[in-house]
Amino acid sequence: MHKLPPPVEWTFATPAITSGYGAEADWAYSVIETSDKAVLAAGFVEDASFNRKPTLYKYDPFKKTVLWESVMFPGSQAITQIGNVFYDVFEFDDGNGNAYYSVGTKTTSNAAGLRLIIAKVHPEDGSAFSGYPKVIQLNIGETIACRGYSMAPIISNNTFDGYMISGYIDDGTIQAVLIKLDENGDIDTGFGIAGYAAFSFTGYEEARFWNFTPIHDSGELLGYAATGWVKDGEDEDIFVVRTDLDGVEEWNNIITRTELNTALYDDGDLDPWRCGVPDGYEANRGFDIKIGPDGDFIISAQVDFYQIRKAEDVDVLCDAPWAAVYVEYTEFSSALLKINENNGTVE
């Protein structure tokens, strides 16, 4: 017996709380439930001139009211820049009191254009802690762009050891990157190469991490697993990397079109292809990675492919001219992939 989905209890659309903002786009990329049962969202707001600002909202779902809004870096910017946004948010007590943290990107006037930003705000009113928000430049030159998509505290054997960030850097080649911060939110130069570990792959012009997960064994931190996508021309493929504590790669797997087709359509009754698999995967992206109950990794992903089906009103053999008898369209699907923890293969 099928059960009906639960009813919608409440909805929330961001109002223009801060003077001048909210006239254009308002996006929330990440949301959490806070320890005081409120809802905290991170994203950006725009004013009428399309100045985009990284923003945190705290919403009370019981009173149905916004408790506060924190807009970072007020002022104008070049509308051609795509930065000034928060992508991830979390709540954490580093031993000095509870706080909300967020990671994202800020536009700058230098050649790179993008800088990593970290926010730390008070839960009561959204005001920033002293020294925050931080605009962070990796020690690799002023022309290197950097974007942070995900951030989490690092805990090993119940000991706090800073924060890890996943994203990408661009020094002429876009490379996926893990960046480690110390307990004060500054670059931990003891990790990787001066605080970061970068990943690129032969045959692909770009690589980006969207999310990562720490790997523990009985409370001890062993390393990290991260997912995102690599790009070659117009084609994007999901990839996953496992590293040790220092960000040194242990294995990687770029999940190809063939592997995706086998994993997602290995049942003949469910196979969408009528006459083979055409070359059409383009935008396959890994967005989140978690550790499953058996220790393997679970990736949530976007899968984009071309479907070619025989037209319903035409009864012909598969070797007939496709253009005359087949309907082609693009389909985006969500997918969950199980990844072997030891070698990265799709299970």
Image (spheres, rainbow, N blue to C red):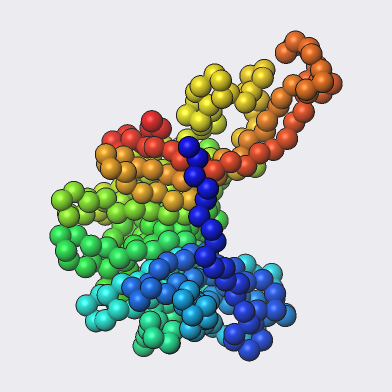
Q: 257 and 109: which one is in front?
A: 257
Number of numbered callouts drawn = 0
Q: Quadrant of residue 114?
A: bottom right
Q: Tell me what residue is drawn at x 48 percent, y 83 percent.
A: 67
Q: 322 and 313: which one is in front?
A: 313
x%, y% of residue 22? 65, 79
Viewer can see residue 113: no
Q: Eyeballing the image, is 231 above or below 246?
A: above
Q: Is residue 177 left or right of residue 25?
A: left
Q: 223 and 305: which one is in front?
A: 305
x%, y% of residue 20? 66, 86
Q: Quadrant of residue 81?
A: bottom right
Q: Eyeballing the image, is 327 above or below 229?
A: above
Viewer can see residue 299: yes
x%, y% of residue 292? 32, 43
Q: Quadrant of residue 82?
A: bottom right
Q: Tell me what residue is drawn at x 51 percent, y 22 percent.
A: 267
